[in-house]
Image (tube, rainbow, N blue to C red):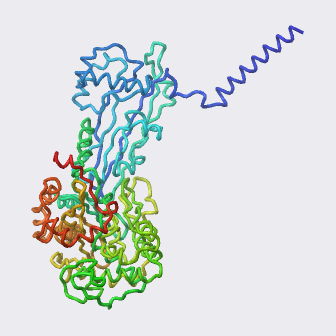
Amino acid sequence: MRKLLLLLTVVTVGLVFIARLFYLQVYNKQAYNLFEDSAIKKVYDYPKRGYVYDRNGKLLVANQPSYDVMVIPREVEPLDTLEFCRLLKISKDDFKKTYDRAKNYSPRLPSVFVPQLSKTDYAVLQEKMRKFKGFYIQKRFLRDYRTSIGANVLGDIGEVNQRIIERQPYYKMGDLIGKQGVELSYEKILRGVKGIKFIQKDRFNKNIGPYKEGRYDTLPQPGKDIKITIDSDLQQYGELLMTNKRGGIVAIDPSNGEILALVTGPSYNPNLLVGRERNKHFSRLFLDTITRPTWDRGLQAQYPPGSPFKVINALIGLQEGVINTSDKVTCRMGYYYGSRRLTGCHHHKSPVDMNNGIAQSCNAYFVNAYRKIVDKYDDAGNAMNTWAKHAKSFGLGNYLGYDLPVGQKGRIPDGDYYDKAYGDNRWGSTYIVSNAIGQGEVEATPIQLANMAAAIGNRGYYYTPHIIKDIEGETIDTKYTTPKYTTIDKRHFEPVIQGMFDVYNKGTAATLRIPGIDICGKTGTAENFIKIDSVKTQLTDHSIFVAFAPKDNPKIAIAVFVENGYWGSRFAGRMASLMIEKYIKGEITRTDMEHWILTHSLENEYAKPYSGEPFKINGETTLQVVDKVVADKVEKLKNDDLSNSIRINANQSNQK
């Protein structure tokens, strides 16, 4: 019996071992992980990143070789630290900090010790690397920007951080990833796939050759090339026009939603964010809170749209049946409610119909139209909801869904917004008349205004703006090729478009005509408030312009916003007309306008909040104007809802 029990025990233990071995080696394929085996060294082979071309096939972004010094902390042996630091051009403190960081990340996994050596430094170091056990050189590719423009569009690449690694296990410490622009938006397409080699080590931690004769090694897959929609010549010209100015220019092809130019001012050379000096340059650019060169004003700046928004109110008024093209409104240098003037206006002939209201940018006409829209309904909240629905159908008040990584939604207020501000049913059309002229609580980004112009030029539809034109071996997402329709009937667009055409023929942009091109546009001027030492102060107005051309079957729609640019036709109008001529003709004939723009700077205007120099409005200082004219309007504007408030710290002001 005892012999039988002993035999049974041996057989049982044997079966258990056999079953376990079968489970580990056959059934459970994940029991052994090459990446977790400390006896196997992993060496990554980084692929070439995809190239970036402009719409015409011009190469904008290529690659250049770079060499990283890698470290595996557990393999490091005693070394001549001073010699190593001298070769790497780092201090001993830097050596210790970097080594400790690598060790904390992982003692047995490789980390970047010194990134992006130059070819010269690499050549010197390579000969002596055998003396420094645990360190090796790894080749990878950095970006080579073949242009000095479009930094906000192209973006840059930089090292991943721990948060990215935890969220995306593909990346390891020291890997590079797109940080902004198309480098970020199309990271997975541009980056390719890393290759890997597994190296077997012996018990003395020495390499003895490929693991399993390289059976599990993989080759890198290069990233795919992409073509973006930007016209690099137009982009370069736009950045030239924006020299010494702040604002944004966005140009779109209305026929397909392709972004032709995306200019932000000021900008910077994308090559500054390449190489070992990247972090230093980025910090300098990012911490510049005055000019904010890393802030894409074309996508992120939310401004009052000003008078270009009047055409939206004209279209809504026609759709709602509360106005027609022949109605005339008397303008007495503004709109009056009883004896109180709610808005001012510049001098022009009166009375005006819709055509002249648009051409001459009459505030009284559009306040009258806006009040009719709101007063059509018994409940102001329902009226504003209807109005907001129409406005949002043009892509306003929401993210457009474009394929760039940053943006703002702007603001189109509805009934709930004003119920919260004033109380339920405690407000009416006279409280919110500033919306009629693109002021008040309405906000939009330049790309939204350009898209609005495209929708009007198309007579009621638009394509989602996008930056991608072609991906090697792939098709473009259908959301960029599917039209979106507004809530306005097509028949209502023609009279409004004629009014925008007459802006150039007999209106506020009559001096900006381009020979041979029928342009439809709208000038705009928006009030500009900031806080200086906690005091709300009115500064020089913003200059705004939207347009499309030609009038029929437009090839370009554009929005230009110039901060502190006085009025619509002064800066923004000139710049928009020049951009249109540059794109359609390929050359500039209005050299008088070009010379004016290139020789006029607004730097003095931007320095005034810090210098204490008074702003002048119609020949009077800001304080005098606020006291005499704007006091009522400023009172109605709420601190948190100023469309372009800028918080300026008093200490910063003094230091500046």
Q: Is residue 504 visible?
A: yes
Q: Is residue 638 left or right of residue 9?
A: left
Which residue is at a point 33% across and 27% down the rendered structure image? 113
Q: Nearer the viewer, residue 424 or 492?
A: 424
State the image quarter where residue 246 is shown.
bottom left
Asked whether residue 483 appears in the rendered view, the answer is no
Q: Residue 649's spot in the image, x, y percent?
A: 24, 49
Residue 455's spot in the image, x, y percent? 37, 73
Task: Choose between 109 and 92: the one closer to the eye.
Answer: 92
Residue at (29% x, 55% y) in the render: 296
Residue at position x 28%, y 58% in the image: 297
Does 114 sit above or below residue 588? Answer: above
**Residue 11 x, y percent position in the rendering:** 79, 16
* Relative depth, front residue between 305 and 2: 305
In the displayed structure, would residue 138 be above or below residue 221?
above
Residue 432 lies left or right of residue 424; in this view the side is: left
Name the residue at the top extreme: 2
Tally the numbered discs: 0
Instruction: Give how far across and how far down residue 530 sits, in percent.
Output: 24, 59
Q: Quadrant of the N terminus?
A: top right
Q: Where is 438 relative to 321, above or below?
A: above
Q: Is residue 195 left or right of residue 229?
A: right
Picture quadrant where residue 334 is located: bottom left
